[in-house]
Amino acid sequence: MIADKLISRYSRIRDVNPILKKIKYYAILRMLLRSLTNIFVPIYYTLSKGSKLIPLDNTNKRIIVSLTTFPARIGKVWIVIEGMLRQKHQPDRIILWLSKKQFTSESILPKKLLKLKERGLEIMWTEEDLRSHKKYYYSLKQFPTDYIITVDDDFFYPSYLITELVELRSRFPKVIACNRAHVMKSNLDKDVKYKEFEFIYESDKPEHNLFFTTGGGTLIMKEDFVEEVFEKEVFMDICMYADDVWLNLMAQFKRTQVIKTKNHIEPIPIFTSNNITLASMNVDLNLNDKQIKDVLDHYKSANLIYSN
């Protein structure tokens, strides 16, 4: 598939030559690949026939792709869902969680998005707006024995994403399987600095000190986290902008290990009119550090925090 080839090439770019990096060769190459992907993949999706989800009788360990979006990106979220519908290992369900506070009714949603309901997309409505936490919160709560795969609303994903995550989780049943991760450089009882986390390209074993990014594609289950993961009043108060931080700490408190896919897959961003992402805001403004500290401070008395 065209998206697979472009993402594979994009994922192999490394800033290895300091001279080429200085003249922005790698940055230009990335931008070229992002532009080609944003032009040709949506055209391919529109002109080619995609598959339809086939409901299975499984009542346990179903694969559920769970995501959310907001008004600024609602016009292009169909691209992400189309990519999930074209996975080599099809999910059992694809659920898009939308807040009634942001979208007054289904009738105002883009026709391209609504058309995907005919092929298996489910649009679920929430009364409250938990922001990016909608991505995982309701699915973990409603489907506690199923595999939940989280993706973001602004990336092109390869058709083998689900295959790699499910195979990895099958090999390590009690471990969170992710596609993108960083190595945490300090224990939770120390001063954690997100910018000091080391991005990793290759990993081959479960570890306690890996920080997964849910938007890169992550397979989780309710059993991976402490029960506090559902304390929405807490995360909306002190960790509103960082579902990654919240889920990682809730997994750390449970002592759940994380493993990254062996082959590095770097999803390609979808161009949108809103260029400000939660990731860039949290990192650039050091909001991740604040939210990590606030969560740790909040749960100190609960005897959940430990040293790796």
Image (cartoon, grey):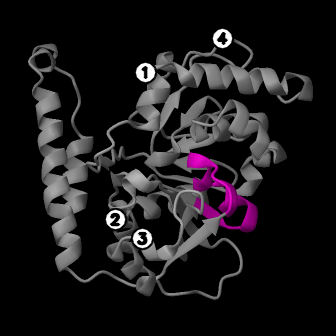
Please name the amino acid that badge 2 sits on.
Answer: Ser
| Residue where numbered disc 1 is placed | 284
Per the image, the residue denoted by label 3 is: 109
Q: Residue at x 44, y 64 (%)?
A: 163
Please give the name of the residue rendered at 69% of the width and 34% of the height, measured from the top-left corner.
Answer: 249
Residues marked 4 and 3 touching at CB (< 8 Å): no
Residue at 66% from the left image edge and 71% from the top image edge: 61
> Which is nearer the eye, 107 or 31?
107
Q: Quadrant of residue 201?
A: top left
Q: Which mark is residue 159?
A: 2
Residue 12 in magenta stretch: no
Q: Which residues are magenta?
A: 127-148
Quarter the C terminus occupies: top right
**Circle nearer the viewer, 2 or 4:** 4
* Disc on the earlier residue, 3 or 2: 3
The amino acid type of the residue labelled 3 equals Leu
In the orientation shown, which residue stands out farthest toward the top?
191
- Nearer to us of marks 2 and 1 is 1
Viewer-nearest residue: 294 or 185: 294
Q: On the rendered image, what quadrant is the N terminus found in?
A: bottom left
Amino acid type at circle 4 is Asp
CA gap, disc 2 and disc 1: 31 Å
Q: Amino acid at mark 1?
A: Asp
Give the image quarter of residue 24.
top left
Q: Which residue is mark 4?
A: 191
Residue plotted at (58% across, 36% down): 242
In the picture provided, is 21 more to the left or to the right than 242? left
Q: In x, y percent, where is residue 251?
A: 71, 40
| Helix, strand or loop for disc 3 | loop
